[in-house]
Amino acid sequence: MRQVGASIASVPLASDERLSGFDQTSSRNMGPIQVKSERQLFVDDFLIAEGRGIHLVVNRPQPTGERCVIADKPWEGFGISGYDSVMNDGRVLRLWYDAVANDGSRWCCYAISEDGVNWEKPNLGIVPFNRCKDTNIVFPPEPMTHEPNCVFKDTNPACPAAERYKMVASLHPPGKKAGTYVAASPDGLHWKLMGDSPAFRPSDTNNICFFDNRIDRYVGYVRMWDPMRKVGRCEFDEITNWGKESVVFSYDDEDERGLDSQLFSGMDFYNSAALKYPRAEGVYLFFPSAYYHYQEALARRMGSPDPKNDGVLDIQFATSRDGKTWNRLDRRPFIRIGLAGGFASGCAYMTSGCIFRPEEIWLYYGVWDHTHGNYNLARDKFIGTLTRARIHIDGFVSVDAECTGGEFTTPLLLFSGHQLTLNVDTSAGGHARVELQNESALPIAGFSAEDCDSINGKFMQKLVSWRGKNDLGALANKPVRLRFVMRDTKLYAFKFE
């Protein structure tokens, strides 16, 4: 697998040529890959042994332009900030979002929605703001130095029901040490700190934490400085003790090589918005905000109150198979900033979590019309917006075949199940076929590409058949290769059912 910061362009493969940097030991020298009946996404070249006329393509989501949540409460007097979390929890969508008042106090607030577009801020009566008791604030219980981070549902089997919801927050509680604390809740509304000491050192970003069932441990993604902002990772068993971090994601020479020196003095990565993808085992996604630092003289000319720490941020994308080694398949923005002067023209930060629908995924992100340092806390009123983008289900990366045709073959696989389904999108004139090969790379009788019934159209879960038959039970748990023969097609995923 590639190392941190490595890049792979969308370049077609010549015949029998591997993708640049592909580690043959990943799939060939270690024997067949156990795919079982788990969904397989093409988030890197791990499932591509050889091919021609294909590209690995990072697909961008479609911004909706909606202003889903805006600042309109006294405790949001300055605005809504970028450290937010969203989840589909039962019959409603739940949002914990970051709000800042004009007095500088910072709050974790709560909202709910049925359609993902219109959000209600319920009067909870849990945490007051000044003399107002009817607020949607859930944390902290009183004003203190506070940066909201992520809220997540703890899937650790050993987690008590009373602690099922967890919140990670940078805090300096009165009389206690400053640092990264973990709070627990039975309902996501009423929170209590777990312990009197921080779980981790101070880390001023939206630190991400979740229980990784692949390794049966918690992981945390935090900020590191070396010398500028990088993303670190912790791995631990006790959620109140994160231990030592190590760098897993960083800027590199390629990032800085093309920067315009009239505009920028450098760049780094602000956060991670790390996500363990729930629909596919062993797939991790990063949505880091790339921070492009303005030259100080330029920021001064723009009237920035903080010219030494000002610049623009957009959202980028990376993938991983283990949560440690991250691949940057495409360094272009995953979500760009908006039209100059518009509500999304200055900064963008991805919200932790996403919402799954049958045909698409909803990604939420916070945006501002000001740059990182060009604002006035006491003067500016009700700035910031939480907006939404949509992407095809499992559609972050696809293997694309050219309009003149292309194909690729997987390494040897071991599967369980009786049928093969594809998440695939062909053009009107495109097609996709699948061939099953034996260990000698020869077509298995009855399952050649010529036998395969051509697939034409867009499908979330298309059952593959060969002359009308689709039962693969006789081949289960035997080493096979898949050969995909396609024309003008995007292949997102496959799954043995």
Image: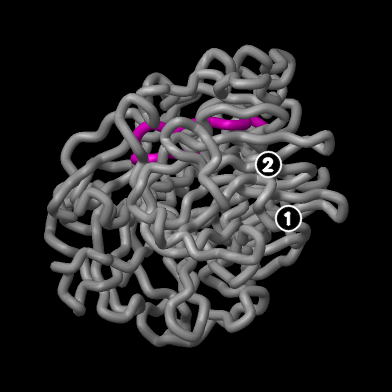
Which quarter of the image is occupied by the N terminus? top left
Q: Main secondary structure of the magenta part?
A: loop
| Residue closest to the eye, 364 or 50 | 50
Q: Amino acid at mark 2?
A: Val
- Residue 343 horizontal/vertical position (percent): 75, 54
Q: Amino acid at mark 1?
A: Ser
Q: Is residue 443 left or right of residue 478?
A: right
Residue 388 colored in magenta in the image: no
| In the depicted structure, whether residue 267 falls above or below residue 210 | above
Q: Which mark is residue 252?
A: none
- Return the residue at label 2: 485
- Residue 277 horizontal/vertical position (percent): 44, 55
Graded by Cα atoms within 10 Å as few (under 14), some (14 to 19) or many (20 or more), the crowding at tag 2 reads many
Residue 326 colored in magenta in the image: yes
Q: In the current view of this chain or complex, which residue is farthest to the right? A: 429
- Residue 372 horizontal/vertical position (percent): 60, 39
| Residue closest to the eye, 478 or 319 | 478
- For the point 45% across and 39% down, the residue is 438
Quadrant in which residue 126 is drawn: bottom left
Mark pair 1, 2: CA separation: 10 Å
- For the point 86% across and 55% down, the residue is 428
Q: Is residue 116 left or right of residue 280?
A: right
Looking at the rendering, the stretch of residues picked out in magenta corresponds to: 318-332
First in sequence: mark 1 or mark 2? 1
- For the point 35% across and 38% down, the residue is 32
Q: Answer whether labels 1 and 2 touch (C-beta < 8 Å).
A: no
* Circle 1: element type: loop
